[in-house]
Image (tube, rainbow, N blue to C red):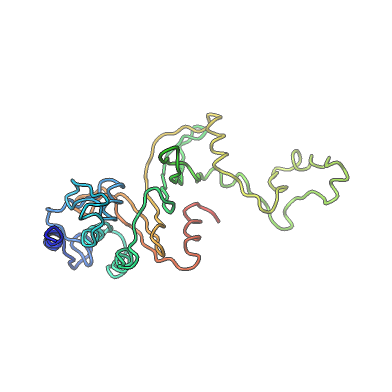
Amino acid sequence: MRKLLLICVFFGAVISIVSGQGLGGPGTIKDDGRFAASTKQLNQFFRRFNGEESVDGNTRFYPGDSLYRNLNLRKGFLQILFDNQTSSISPEFKNQFIQAVLSDTYPRYLIFAREGWLAEVDTEFFFKGKREKVTFIMKIQPQLLGYEWVIDQVIFDPFKNLFNKPVGDKKEFLHPLSHELGFMNLRRAFQDSNLPESFTSSSYKPDYLSVFLYEMKQNNLRFETVTGVKFHFFQIGGWYFEVNNFNRPGFNTGWLISNLVRLGPGDKETILKYIYDQD
């Protein structure tokens, strides 16, 4: 009980909601320097979101510890896990999310090994001698006794028009009696046409990741550097949020929630299509 009281007093003393925009702005956190506010690693974002470390970040809490996932500890942490300087998330909307996360009947937590979160990694490659931006969508999957990050999708502009399948009366086709000719008219698809994808099924979707890996094996692609990383979370039922790394002066820095959306019917699928760059 004494530890719980100390936590409440500590957060009340060093964190306050004040008016104005940005650090010390309306609905933002004012920190007098005694709180280790910067969330320096994404794993620390998980721990703070769940209430699994001390206020100074020096002590991990585990199941069985008296402060593990403590309600007041989580509430204090959640207030500082938002980008309060540049995002357009209103204080009221942020508080609605926090209340949903801290629900008495069904509190929500982030689980590293559970589905429902993705990494979006921006990189630069040289493609046939030209510098190009490549975005990878990555996810966690089980691997032996642990887990691994794997590439789930690649977004690469030079590939987007490789498979430009026509539609309607502009689409070439093979006659329905082609089988009677022993399909000898496949010459039309493979020699006479510049759009062989015209002859694929209506459900055909190009696999850009396989094309990308093929080009790498042909030494047409060379990795240069990573230019940016952000994360997409769907683990909190009814909500989506995006986490970015903010490297700037002040206390509102590190890995912070930069975008927050309450999900309605079909919204999750729409956001995923946008993330994966699907029409």
User: Residue extending furthest bottom?
Assistant: 92
Does 256 appear above or below 135?
below
Where in the figure is residue 211, as x and y percent of width and height? 57, 39
Does 156 appear above or below 272?
above
In this image, 253 relative to 134: left or right? left
Quadrant position of the C terminus in the picture: bottom right
**For the point 73% across and 43% down, which residue is it?**
193
Quadrant position of the N terminus in the picture: bottom left
User: Residue extending furthest front?
Assistant: 64
- 3 and 247: which is toward the camera: 3
**For the point 56% across and 47% down, which residue is it?**
160
- 46 and 217: which is toward the camera: 46
In this image, 227 relative to 81: left or right? right
How many labels were placed on the picture? 0
In this image, 211 relative to 202: left or right? left
Where in the figure is residue 277, as x and y percent of width and height? 51, 52
Where in the figure is residue 253, as x and y percent of width and height? 24, 51
- 181 and 107: which is toward the camera: 107
Where in the figure is residue 132, as x and y percent of width and height? 46, 40
**Quarter assignment of residue 81:** bottom left
**For the point 31% across and 51% down, which residue is it?**
46
**For the point 70% across and 48% down, which residue is it?**
200
In this image, 211 relative to 38: left or right? right
